Amino acid sequence: MKKNTLHNFLLFTTLSLASACSSTENLATQQAQVSEWPRGVTYEIFVQSFCDSDGDSIGDIKGMTARLDYLQDLGVGAVWLMPISPSPSYHKYDVVDYYGVHPDYGTKEDFQEFVRQAHQRDIKVVIDLVLNHSGVDHPWFQSAKSDPNSPYRDYYVWAHKDDPETQTEGKILAGDSDNVNRWHEVKGNDYRYYGYFYGGMPDLNFDNPKLREEVFTIGRHWLTEMGVDGFRLDAARHIFPDDRPEDNHQWWVDFKTEMQKVKPDVYLVGEVWADAETVGPYTKGLHALFNFDMGYAITNAVQQERADSLVIKHKNIRDYYRSINPDFIDATFLTNHDQNRIMSELNGDINKARMAAALLFTLPGAPYIYYGEEIGMKGKKPDELIREPFIWEEASKDGCRTKWVQAKHSTEQAVVPAAAQAADENSLLNHYKTLIRFRNNSKALTYGEVEPLQLQNPAIAAFTRRHEEEDVLVLHNLSGTAVNMPLPENLKTYTTTAFQSNEASFRKGAVQLPAYSTLILRK
């Protein structure tokens, strides 16, 4: 596609999806939200796979800008962009310029326009900030490795090849890395550098005051000059080595303090891939943390069709975090760009995918959606195949679809395109939209705490959510078998149906929960 056809392409594709969307009630109503970001819904985007505006097969910022109306229709309050800075890799987590935008994606001006357009739609913009390491090709590291007297030498962590520390293997801590060889050689040099993830990503040395100030400057640049609203902080657990967790905790307190000086309402969400006990102390310095435990728990519950202790576990985690920081934000999700996609984890079962979404949007937390999750995209590792191109329309019409990788899992044979789903009121996409709209208009689901209930049926996830005047009872049937039962005496004050799926209903004090259905009652 030629550059001079860009305007017509964007206009056509935007209007075609809008036309399809207008046929469903779910999209015809403008939301009057009671939820406010950052406690709303956020959408994770891998720019490379989202929308290609210029026909070079790679997703870009202008393409993403053209799809902001789709995101607004979906009901999200923010987007989180995986790294957009210059990098030699497709994933761009090995940054070589912390102040730039990758030329494949566009220009700084393109990005500033994207932010402006997003803000016009009340959509916040969070970018991935990769501070644990730089790329091996970063000018800092190239200078540091070639000259022991370089001013950037101490931006990285070095040890002599004979140091016993370089002879030991690291421990695998969690799902963020299976690398155990942390010390890496420089050809013709007696010194080795530390790289937690691998040799192409040398760790930065946060014991160096100059490096720390440089990082503060980077953050200020994106908040002030580029207009972003916050950062997703990659590998937040690994700023300092594994045996210095307290230093990690303090660093994020310091970083937040500095960022708040230029943007008081800055939002910081951290990746600490670990159990709740390890994650907890990070809530002092980071506004939000991803709840990996709950992502796994929801997936397991839906796979096994058993609620068991799902809600109890969620409440216990939240109570623990609140004991450390009462204002923390629980960033909940199903799967992300480092994990097999939820639809593949559920073996392509759309009923179970609907149930996973229903749990995500009705349990406490600020939910994150991984791009394409809402249309049932599939994917299994290696990583490129869990980051496949978004399917907007049929191939013959889809001028937006990227082609940087050959899709293996999310093909047209396996996934119904977004435009077709928008026109189908029973689609997974419209299921997501309905759930998000209901949550956005419910104070109880946005802000309320959770009270687990036991209804003597392991297939039923039951709980109440309360906030101010709103009090709701949530019932999910995780199984493929219908459940009909009277409500216990203590729940009979919940009499008004607020939400239902799969023809779930409430009559004469009893609930009818067909297979894989949800029913929400209000008092």
Image: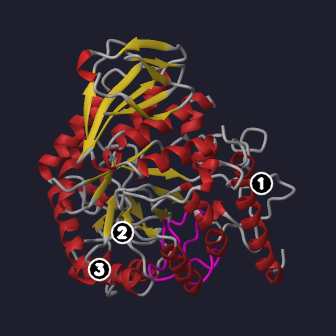
Q: Is residue 236 above or below residue 503?
A: below
User: Is residue 251 placed above or below 244 in the rendered structure?
Assistant: below
Confirm or deny contact between disc 3 and disc 1 (CB under 8 A): no
Residue 269, picture quadrant: bottom left
State the residue at coordinates (69%, 54%): 21
**Which type of secondary structure does the marked residue at label 2 adopt?**
loop
Residue at 22% across, 46% down: 278
Q: Position of residue 383 (x, y in %)?
A: 57, 49
Looking at the picture, the colour scheme in use is secondary structure
On the question of residue 477 being in view, the answer is yes
Neighbour tally class for label 3: few under 14, some 14-19, many 20 plus, Cα within 10 Å: some
Number of numbered discs present? 3
Residue at the left extreme, as displayed: 323
Q: Which residue is mark 1?
A: 393
- In front: mark 1 or mark 2? 1
Residue to which mark 2 is pinned: 131
Disc 1 on helix, strand or loop? loop
Residue 368 is tagged as none
Amino acid at dot 1: Glu
- Which residue is the site of mark 3? 263
Span shown in magenta: 83-107
Answer with the quarter of the image where residue 427 lies. Answer: top right
